[in-house]
Amino acid sequence: MAYTPIIQLKNIYKSFGETEVLSDLSLDVSEKEFITLLGPSGCGKTTILRIVGGFETPDSGRVIFSGKDITNVPPNKREINTVFQKYALFPHMNIQDNIAFGLKISGKSDQYIRDKIKYALKLVNLDGYETRSIQSLSGGQQQRIAMARAIVNEPKVLLLDEPLGALDLKLRQDMQYELIRLNNELGITFIYVTHDQEEALTMSNKVVVMNMGHIQQMGTPEEIYNEPENAFVADFIGDSNIIDGVMQEDRIVTICGENWPCIDEDFGRQKPVDVVIRPEDIIIGEPGTGRLDGEVVHNVFIGVHYEMEIEAGGFTWLAQNTTSYEVGSKVSIDVTPSNIQIMHKPQSIEEEAMEIDT
């Protein structure tokens, strides 16, 4: 589905002291999109959010909102609201006063405010909670109130800075579905920041993977997981076997001394490459039936499958299977050609960090 860009970041640079946090970063965010900025601590994702919200100003570059330059527009003049991890609710106010705070400042009528509070509480499934105190709510309920307060002003863009980080696993999963529902019902653009890969893959239309101030890859959750563009993305998004390989020719790669068929082309001949194979794509069989023979050296049950380490070809492979193989078992491993991902090997740390999608 094609949407009109509502936010455009153009050639953004930002440093704090001697530390460069963002380097020539450009990014388009489409209207009504649920986009997640994903990466490790210090990668620049929260700085992007703060620049979009107006809480930080870039050293250079521009922030465009619906075609207008808002780089120097203060936060309260932008049609953008933010939901923080710590909720930022007022403990001395009840729920309706917390939600109404921004509406009262903007001079809305009492009847308008009452109607909007009722509407917002219904959206977050907390009807009838108007007079409850903040202290009486669970963490999940407080997060919903923070969401209600953010959406009651009808922003065009909602910024969410790791809002589920303080919740336990079950509440976090429940709130993921709540956020998806709110995005669909309200038609507001969501820009979400997290270091949690599961959150990014579960909720987003588009995932932006970042490292060291650069965008490593942008795409749908399926594209990011199934077609990582470099070893950093493959390693950061889920578990991966990342192996040194040599591309012999189109569709043939040498891994652990054996030639494996793959589907990749145009890497040249005798070229060192990174090879990525997901644990769930490893086929385990009897010795002599696969590409490499090896031995199971570790096995643990993690709920829906067994996670095993298999030493084969001088490499310790991570494999996932619904069938358990005892430690010490002799096995073989193989991989379907379409499940072997070939990537260019970076020549330096700087090249590894460089932006791939602009």
Image (cartoon, rainbow, N blue to C red):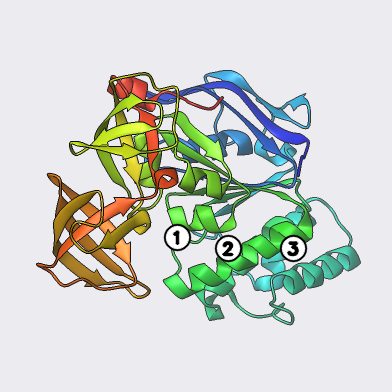
Element at label 3: helix
Q: Quadrant of residue 69?
A: top right
Q: What distance separates the C-alpha of mark 1 from that of mark 2?
A: 16 Å
Q: Nearer the viewer, residue 231 or 342?
A: 342
Q: Amino acid at mark 1?
A: Gly
Position of 69 with respect to 14 (left or right) is right
Q: Nearer the viewer, residue 338 or 214?
A: 338
- Residue 21 in the image: state x and y as whole percent: 42, 28
Q: Amino acid at mark 2?
A: Leu
Residue drawn at point x = 49 percent, y = 68 percent: 172
Element at label 2: loop
Q: Quadrant of residue 289?
A: bottom left
Q: Quadrant of the C terminus?
A: top right
Local crowd at mark 3 within 10 Å, few (<14), some, or many (≥20)? many
Q: Quadrant of residue 303?
A: bottom left
Q: Which residue is mark 1?
A: 165
Q: Which residue is mark 3?
A: 100
Closer to us: mark 1 or mark 2? 1
Closer to us: mark 3 or mark 1? 1
- Residue 355 in the image: state x and y as whole percent: 46, 25
- Residue 338 in the image: state x and y as whole percent: 45, 44
Q: Amino acid at mark 3?
A: Ala
Residue drawn at point x = 59 percent, y = 19 percent: 61
Q: Which residue is mark 2?
A: 89
Q: What distance separates the C-alpha of mark 2 from that of mark 3?
A: 12 Å
